Image (tube, rainbow, N blue to C red):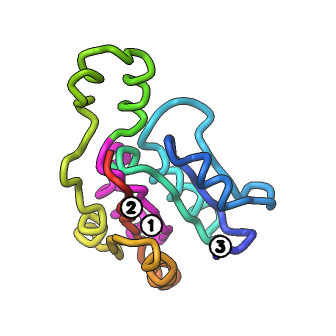
């Protein structure tokens, strides 16, 4: 689906292993990930990569929490303002799965585990595609796997046309 030269910026946590299995990268510099622990750097990093390599296709893979921490309205505006469009694919499980999983591992008999409430859910979630559209970008929400390939192509067309794009891919909720 992606060219060998496409630069993938990834800020995935609980979905990192699956994405790496399905997106093997063999060209040096075509896969970028944070070396430390922090959330929110992926959108800004994607702009920086696009500014440094304007001829390259840049795709950012990130979770919903990472997207929120990345000040998406500002990032998408900057992407438009400085003509550095990229595609962001948001793995939207409507919560912080890493927080839930870590809490369950560290405190398996704790209050959160006993009550089944890890305070890690976004509830009905946030419409990340709407945030993209509000910031002047392309945004589309994907509800089922068969819809994803065509949506990716529409988003890539928008990026090729100079518009940053966000695909809000709904996953099973936290």
Of the two numbered discs 2 and 3 in the rendering, the one whose residue sits closer to the viewer: 3
Find numbered disc 2 in the image and state the secondary structure of the residue it sits on.
helix
Residues under labels 3 and 1: Cα distance? 24 Å
Spatial CA span between label 1 and label 2: 6 Å
How many other residues sit within 10 Å of disc 2, few (<14), some (14-19) or many (≥20)?
some
Q: Residue 156: x, y in percent? A: 51, 79
Q: Which residue is mark 1?
A: 82
Q: Position of residue 28 (x, y in %)?
A: 80, 56
Q: Is residue 58 left or right of residue 81?
A: right
Q: Which residues are magenta?
A: 69-95
Residue 92 counted in the magenta span: yes
Residue pictured at 44% horizontal, 38% vertical: 39
Number of residues whose C-alpha sits closer than 10 Å to that of mark 1, classed few (under 14), some (14–19) or many (20 or more): few
Residue 48 percent location from the top left of the image? 55, 55
- Please identify the quarter of the rendering in which residue 119 is found: top left
Element marked by disc 3: loop
Can you tell which of label 3 and label 1 is closer to the viewer?
A: 3
User: Nearest the camera: 98 or 47?
Assistant: 98
Q: Quadrant of the C terminus?
A: top left
């Amino acid at each position: 689906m992606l060219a060998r030269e496409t630069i993938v910026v990834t800020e995935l946590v609980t979905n990192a292993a699956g994405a790496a299995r399905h997106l093997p990268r063999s060209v040096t510099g075509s896969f970028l990930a944070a070396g430390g622990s922090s959330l929110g750097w992926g959108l800004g990093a994607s702009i920086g990569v696009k500014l440094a390599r304007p001829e390259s296709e840049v795709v950012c893979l990130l979770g919903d929490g990472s997207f929120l921490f990345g000040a998406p309205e500002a990032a998408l505006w900057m992407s438009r303002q400085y003509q550095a469009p990229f595609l962001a694919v948001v793995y939207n499980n409507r919560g912080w799965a890493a927080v839930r999983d870590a809490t369950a591992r560290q405190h398996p008999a704790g209050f959160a585990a006993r009550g089944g409430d890890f305070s890690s859910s976004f509830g009905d979630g946030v419409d990340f595609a709407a945030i993209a559209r509000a910031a002047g970008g392309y945004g589309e929400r994907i509800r089922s796997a068969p819809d994803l390939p065509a949506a990716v192509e529409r988003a890539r067309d928008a990026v090729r046309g100079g518009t940053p794009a966000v695909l809000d891919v709904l996953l099973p909720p936290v």
